[in-house]
Structure formats: structure tokens, C-alpha cells
Amino acid sequence: MAEGRLVAWRKKEGDPIEEGEVIAEVETDKAVMDLEAFESGVLRKILIHEGDRAAVNTPIAIVGSAGEPIESLLPSSPASSLPAQPRPAGVPESRPPEKTGPSPAGNASAEEGSRVKASPLARKIAAEGGLPLSTLSGSGPGGRIVKQDVLHALAGSPLAAPAAPAQASLGEERLLPLSLMREQIGARLLASKTSIPHYYLEIEIDASPLLALRAEINEALAALPSEEKLSINDFFLKATAEAARRVPEVNASWEGKGIRQFAAVHLAVAVAVSDGLITPVIRSAQDKSLRELAREGKELAGRARERKLKPEEYSGGTLTLSNLGMYGIESFAAIINPPQALILAVGALTKKPVVDDQDRIVVGHRVRLVASCDHRIVDGALGARFLREIKGLLERPLGLLL
């Protein structure tokens, strides 16, 4: 992390704080994190305001005792934060003007943030759109303001910028500010595509046995008290982890003078979020059952969409799976997630005429898989072995249950 954005203050100037107490919410390139106080005392001065960005190690506030002089700690010029992203025309500045002297009220938006109940993502979108949270009523539990409340308000507000490009009508030309996530995606994928020698392998699998087994399992699960169901993607998670266990050479990364081969398959799963994507990681996926992978994958994806993942939950992946089948995409080639050596792209389940083992033309269920490989680590024959293992596992899926 090189910089962050102050999403919301949970405390205002003059408030007492305790060590370990959450005092602010900070957006990284991947998540919105709670910032805990390192010491107890009084929040004497806020230096970085809501919506502002700052480099790592930039002071964001001054904490001390109630009567302690702090003049020598105040910056002689405005706080050394990075310049704020340019705002679309017509959108007002979301933070209030600075006060000339100490005031118990302190920062107005910080006071609002401590009074109004709202999710971190709702605060983020409201801050970017210049929309005061105090003007909204929440539809979440206990009146909490959630993402949809803010989006609905922004859509009807002439002063606020739409929260997503999809809300803009044709003919509106504007410069959209980059989020920290989008900046990081741009930098990492540009580096990946220009520095890693990509090549691609595609294979088609017969998904009919998989569909039959899934239907049988879900029928059995329906008789249980829980509402658990297995998706087709859950089988792809299991097959990918097992294939990487059988072909461990693909579970590696390039380190200049050597290739690091990992002892465990830490399976990263691409999840679309509001302003980009994130890859939560299922640790030691090769040791987990189909149902364990299904539960953990769904739980991580849910918290990823809420921007609530911890750093250790989206870092350290050794292999990535990306599935766009739910959007009807039959085949695509993904960009490798560095420093990994391979990313597997899963397309949509399609019906098509196929020739069976008795040379009859029948209706078949097919899924296309594309492996994007780093040729420095994964040669063509090695990548083909990996895809062959996945194909065998998915076309004889009963083995995935063992």
C-alpha cells in the first residue's frame, strides 16, 4: 500500500479515544479498513479530512491530553496529503471549509460520520458524490444507510455525480476520478501484460456428468435443515485445486534467479465489486472438501463485495480462477495475476450438437476453459497436462467427492 483515502471519521475533534478503539475508516486499493487508535487520549486535531487521500506515514490527526499544547505539531502549510482526485463539473466539495481555531465541533463531516449509521461502502459512495449522509434515511437493519440508499439518492440529485458510469446517459462527456482500486488494477495488469510472456490454452469439457451429479447432491441437500446448495463454480474450484495438486509445477511464481514452487494451493477467485475486482484467497484449497470450498468461497465473495476483507484474505494467492459464465461469455482469456504463473478462465455452460460415442448427433452440455500461462514457468506441454487433469476430474466428477 502506497496511499489511502480517509473514508470517514468515527470521532470528532475533542472526543476522548481509547487504545484499540476504531476512530476512522480508511480505503486501501482492495478494501475499506477500520483504523484503530494506537494510544488513549483526546483527538485534538484532524489533519486529513474525509474524502482526502494521503501517502503512507502521513500524519492524519493529533492525539494528546486535553490541555497539552499542540501548536508545534501543526503543519505550517496545509496537510501533506496527496492532491484530491479532480471532481466532475458541478459537484460540490464534500468536506467543509477549515476552521481557523480549535472548536469542539471540529470537522462537520466527521461529526456527521459519528452520528449517522451507514455502511463503509455507502459512506464512500456518498463522499465521492458530495452527498451528506444526514440527508438520507436508511433501509438497512436499524435504519442503517446502505449502498442502495445512496445510489437512489444520487440518481435523483442534480448536484451529485452518478455513482457509476452506467448511470450516465449518452452525450455526457466527463472525466471520472480513479478509485484506489482502479489505479492499482491498471498498474498491476499493465505490468503483467507487458512483462509476463502470456500464451493461452483452450479446452472444452463435457459438463453433462457434472450437471447430473450436482442435481443429485442438491436434491439430497434440500432434505437437510440448511439452505446449502452447490453451484457449478464450486466444482470448478475443487477441480482446479486438485489438478494443481497433481501438477504442482503450475502452482509457482517466477523470482528472477529461480522458480518458487509452493507447497499449498492458495486458490484466488476473481470477484467483481462496484469499482473493479478483487481476488479473495481460499487457503490450502487442495485439502478442503467440495462443500468446504463452496462455503468458504461464497463467504469470502460476500465480504469482498462489501469491501470487508482483511489483507491476509486477498493476498498470497498462488493460482487464480475467473468465471464469467454467469454473464453468458462462452470463452475468454484472462490476464495473469502476478506473481502467479497461471489463471484459469471459465466460460458459460452452453447446449450444442455433439457426436456421442456411438457417432450419433445429440444435445450436449459444454464448457470452455482457457488457461493463460506464464511461458517462463509453464511450457505448453505442462499447461496441457494441467488442463487435461481438470477435464478428467470434471467429466468424472464423482472423484471430486472423495
Image (spheres, rainbow, N blue to C red):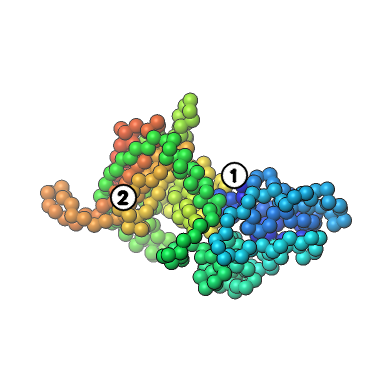
Which secondary structure lies at badge 1? loop
Residue 291, how many percent across, how many down? 42, 53
Residue identified by numbered label 1: 1
| Residue density around tag 1, few if under 14, some if 14–19, many if 20 or more, within 10 Å | few
> Residue 137 sits in which quadrant?
bottom right
Q: Quadrant of the N terminus?
A: top right
> Residue 375 sits in which quadrant?
top left
Residue 393, can we see it? no
Residue found 57% across the figure and 69% down from its top: 159
| Residue density around tag 2, few if under 14, some if 14–19, many if 20 or more, within 10 Å | some
Q: Which mark is residue 26?
A: none
**Residue 194 vs residue 392: left or right?**
right
Residue found 35% across the figure and 42% down from its top: 371
Which secondary structure lies at badge 2? loop
Nearest the camera: 302 or 401? 302
Residue identified by numbered label 2: 331
User: What amino acid is at disc 1?
Assistant: Met
Q: CA distance from mark 2 to mark 1?
A: 33 Å
Give whichever of discs 2 and 1 has the lower sequence position: 1
Residue 183, how many percent across, how many down? 52, 48
Nearest the camera: 52 or 340? 52
User: What amino acid is at disc 2?
Assistant: Ser
Nearest the camera: 388 or 343? 343
Up the image or down, 307 lies above or below 92; here it is above
Counting labels gives 2
Up the image or down, 117 lies above or below 258; here it is below
